[in-house]
Image: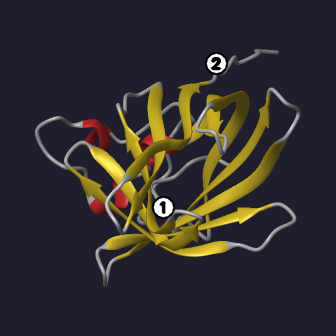
Amino acid sequence: MKAPRNIISALAISSCVAFSTNALADDMPPEPTAQYDFLLGDWDLEAATMLPDQTLLPGSGVMNVYVVHEGHTLQADMRVEFENGTGFIGSTMRTYDPVNENWAVSWIPAGSQASAGATAVWQEDRMVETWPTGQDQFGPFETTLTFSDITEDRFVVSQDYRYVNGPVIEGVWQYVATRRDVTVIED
């Protein structure tokens, strides 16, 4: 596993369990380049995806998050398997854009086309990614992916559809991430 670094300044962090205290401060928003620092490391996931009848299909998985591109991009590799045997493998790339003062986000699922064009900004105590407009049998919708309840060892994610004609479907895709135990074996 690659050693995590502060995303833009590429300062070395001594351990995968380190994170930016600014990203978790209650009294002030984190510095823009540290907004996703809470993601760095290895995570166990308890996940669910919504089926067409709006019931949830549970699953579990793992995620490894580290920096690439000389510290300018955060990469999250994810593998999830659902109780019915389906699942996915993919990576999300997040790069801070100082000109637009937001994050550019792309999802790259294994064996499929990439989804790009999302932006992310810190809103109050959460990180919110907004994806390009989609369309299904109910009409056009905006997808948001919200990271909330962020602590050093846990966070919650919910993907919601906000339809142009008004309705909101919350939790279309959701997971709770818990930091994996990192055991150091001494020789």
**Residue 145, label in figure:** none
Hey, what amino acid is under mark 2? Asp
Quadrant in the picture for the C terminus: top right
Residue positioned 66% across, 45% down in the render: 52
- Asked where in the image residue 164 lies, by quadrant, the reply is bottom left
Q: Position of residue 110 (x, y in %)?
A: 83, 60
Query: For this view, does 29 lie left or right of residue 18?
Result: left
Quadrant in the picture for the N terminus: top right
Question: Which element carries disc 1, helix, strand or loop?
Answer: loop
Residue found at the far bottom of this picture: 99
Instruction: Please name whichever residue, 29 or 170, is drawn nearer the observer in this view of the structure.
Output: 170
Query: For this view, does 64 lie left or right of residue 14?
Result: right
Query: For this view, does 143 lie left or right of residue 59?
Result: left
* Vertical side of 37 occupied by 135: above or below: below
Per the model, the C-alpha gap separating discs 2 and 1 is: 25 Å
Pointer 1 residue: 10
Residue positioned 80% across, 26% down in the render: 83
Q: Position of residue 151 (x, y in %)?
A: 37, 28
Label 2: how many Cα within 10 Å (few below 14, some 14–19, many 20+): few
Q: Position of residue 158 (x, y in %)?
A: 47, 42
Query: For this view, does 48 lie left or right of residue 170?
Result: right
* Vertical side of 25 occupied by 93: above or below: below
Q: Disc 2 vs disc 1: which is toward the camera?
A: 2
Pointer 2 residue: 181
Hey, what amino acid is under mark 1? Ala
Q: Position of residue 40 (x, y in %)?
A: 53, 43
